[in-house]
Structures are given as C-alpha cells and as structure tokens.
Amino acid sequence: MLRTAVALCLFILAASCVAPTDAAEWYRFRGPSGDGHVDAVGLPLQWSSTQNVTWKQAIPGQGWSSPVVSNGRIYLTAAVPLNESAKPDYSLRLLSFEAKTGKEIASVEIFQQDASSAPRIHQKNSHASPTPIIEGDRVYVHFGHQGTACVTLDGKSVWKNRDLTYKPVHGNGGSPVIVDDALIFSCDGATDPFVVALNKNNGEIIWKTPRITNAERNFSFATPLPIEVNGRIQVVSPGSGAVCSFDVVTGEELWRVDYGQGYSVIPKPVYAHGLVFVCSGWSTPVLYAIRPDGSRDVTKTHVAWKTNKRVPNTPSLLIVEDELYMVADNGVASCLDARTGKLHWKERIGGNYSASPIFAKGKIYLQSEQGDTTVLEAGVSFKKVARSTLGERTLASVGVVDRAFLIRSDRHLYRIEGR
C-alpha cells in the first residue's frame, strides 16, 4: 500500500531539499535531489572536445534524455532508426555504458515505433527525450505516448505499459518521478490532458486524473515535483493553463494556480523557503512563487510574487540558499531573491539554452545548445569564472559521476573531469 511508507518518503523528500547528494548515484533527472545540486569535489571548470576528456563514446540514433548513473554504469535512452527512409521506423532503446571507460555494455529494445502512426516532432525534440529513473535493481524508462516500461539493470523486462494512448504535439518530453510505489508523470497532449500514477512494481494504473483548464493549447512537457507540506505528500505538476498539485495516494487535485493561456510548459518546478517556483510556458513565460498549503483555486491568495522578466521557456530553475538563478532560452541569465523576487543581477551570457543548470561547490554551470558551458560564481553579484566549448549540439541536461560531468551531445557521450 502507498501509505505504508509515508514516513520514509517524508524523510527522503525533506532531506532532498537541503542535503548534499551522492555524485556516484545520479539516478534521475537533475540528480538525486531532483534540483540540479551535486556534492562533488574536483569537478572541472573548463574543457574542450579534447581537454579534460576522459573518454568520448559515439551514441547510436537520436535522443535528448539525460544520462543517469548507478553502480558504475551509465544509462540513457535513444531512438535508433530501423531504415534509411525520410520517416523511418524506430527502435526505442535503453543503452548502458561503463562509467569509467565509456564502453557500451548493452543496448536493449524497449518498444518499436511505427513510422506510419508516429506524429511529427519538434526540431529541438527527439523520440527519446524523457530521462530514465534508477531505483534499486530496476530502471524505469518512459517514451511518452509510445509507452512506459521497467527493466532490470541488466535489461531484462519486468513490465511494459502501452495503454495510455493520447495524441502528442511535438513529441514526448517530461520525465517521471517515483514516490513510494507510484511512478508519476503527465500526459499533456493535443486534447484531454491528464496526470497518471502507475504501480512501479507491475505497471498498472493506480490513479489517472484529468487536467481541466481553459487553455486552448493543451500540450506541455513538464516533469512533476513531489513535496511534503504539513505532513502530506503532494505532487506539483505544471501543464497548459495552470499548475496543479495532486495527492500522491489518490490523485485528488489539492490546489491550483491558473496562468491563462500558457502552454508547452517544460521547466521542472523547484521548492525552497516554503515556496514552489513554477514557469508558465509559451508565449510569455511568467515565473510564479506559490505557497503550496492552500486548497482548490489559490490563484488570488497563494502567489507570493511573480515576474515575466527573463523567464525561461525550457531550462529549469535553480535555487542556491536564498537566491534563485535562471537562464532564459535566449541566453540572458539572472539572479533573484527567492523569497521576494528582487533582482540582484542580469547578464547576457550568449547562446541559446535548453539544458537545466547545475550547482556544485559554489559554482553554477550553464550549458548552451551550441555546446558552450559558462561557469558562474554563485552569489548576489555577477562573476563569470570560465567558459568552455565542446563544439557539438547539446540540449540534454548533464549528469554527474564521481568528479566528472557526463555530457550528451547529438552524436556522443563525454566523460569530462578535472585532473
């Protein structure tokens, strides 16, 4: 039963907001704490396609899922074309590599995607964009409308679910999260969007809750955020038109904040200082700081502050102590007081951005789509520390293992570490 481990879940969720993370186990999107923080000594400040590169491994097919790590192995997903036609069938696969050497260990087909029924995707998307989750001896992989599955670390199938059919727009995107026995993700397609929890042990539906808003464009791609408020676990899930929070056990909608016609919402929310920080998506993104202790529609009562200046459409936010950091898709970075929204600084750092930022040992790492990474000193004054150029397109958020970054480009996976 879901409630049998609530006390343990509350401990884990509370610790994830403040505790250092284990860089050897980067097991989900944005790392163990789910917010881009990593406790690692000796991460590099600068690199190139050859400098500080421990290894470089070619990756078959296409994909923008982030690398995850457990027990010395790296896992990521890819969509490998099965023919050379303009619109090929794809093998949707889980790949694994040795973390120390980059040697490929396995390539396991999870699903096949039929080209005749597969919709078009956005030029910045892929057929393998959601990031896997590792828990214990299992890996959970999600391909949006194409299905969700669980395999062992060695790639043996545990279960598959292809029953959650919906019509996507621009392809798949948001990653799942795990709370107790529930694997939770959003299915925000062209019509009838919903949020769903599957039993992580067998793939069966625990609950499925419609997302009801007045948005004209229903599609979105955000990763949910589990939080604990007043002794109760809730899952915050932004979508088109509104951000809603759901009871993790029943799927009941607890509260919502409406934001009009905002759509194609991508950034994962973050939680700090008793506030949930949410971006509202296209066309004019607004950042909302929300108190998550309300009930029903709290649009007029629980928004502590908001801003529409320099808000990202794609990269997630980063909270470090009292400051909120963000980089807009057009390369303007800014730092705000997380409690009040007061602006500390704003700077154009160049490039376009999709990957979510990383914080490690006082430094903030911002990776552009062009393959450049800018390193900033965390603080209320802007201080640029370093800039690196990889020379390959990079939309996936980075992973971390030991004292190394794992960077996925459109062609390779790199292990980059300090000397």
Image (cartoon, rainbow, N blue to C red):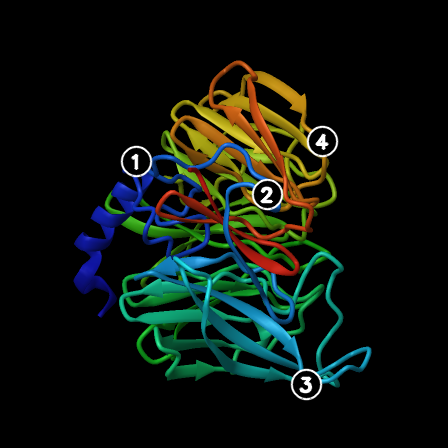
Classify 89 as above or below 400: below
Q: Which residue is mark 2?
A: 315
Give the x, y percent position of residue 396: 58, 53
Q: Which residue is mark 3?
A: 114
| Amino acid under disc 4 | Gly
Instruction: Please tell me which of labels 3 and 1 falls first in the chain.
Output: 1
**Local secondary structure at mark 3:** loop
| Amino acid under disc 3 | Asp
Q: Are marks 2 and 3 in contact (CB under 8 Å)?
A: no
Q: Which residue is mark 4?
A: 350
| Amino acid under disc 1 | Val
User: Which mark, residue 205?
Assistant: none
- Marks 4 and 1, how far apart at CA: 31 Å
In the image shown, does 46 or 34 lie closer to the viewer?
46
User: In percent of the image, x 44 and y 34: which residue is there?
Assistant: 359
Mark 4 Cα-neighbour bin, 10 Å: few <14, some 14–19, many ≥20: some
| Amino acid under disc 2 | Pro
- Marks 3 and 1, how far apart at CA: 44 Å
Q: Are marks 4 and 1 in contact (CB under 8 Å)?
A: no
Classify 368 as above or below 143: above
4 or 1: mark nearer the eye? 4
Residue 284 shown left or right of residue 202 in the figure: right
Q: What is the quadrant of the N terminus in the image?
A: bottom left
In the image shown, does 59 or 251 lie closer to the viewer?
59
**Local secondary structure at mark 1:** helix
Classify 64 as above or below 356: below
**Local secondary structure at mark 2:** loop
**Local secondary structure at mark 4:** loop
Mark 2 Cα-neighbour bin, 10 Å: few <14, some 14–19, many ≥20: many
- Marks 2 and 4, how far apart at CA: 15 Å
User: Which mark, residue 18?
Assistant: 1
Q: Which residue extends farthest right?
A: 86
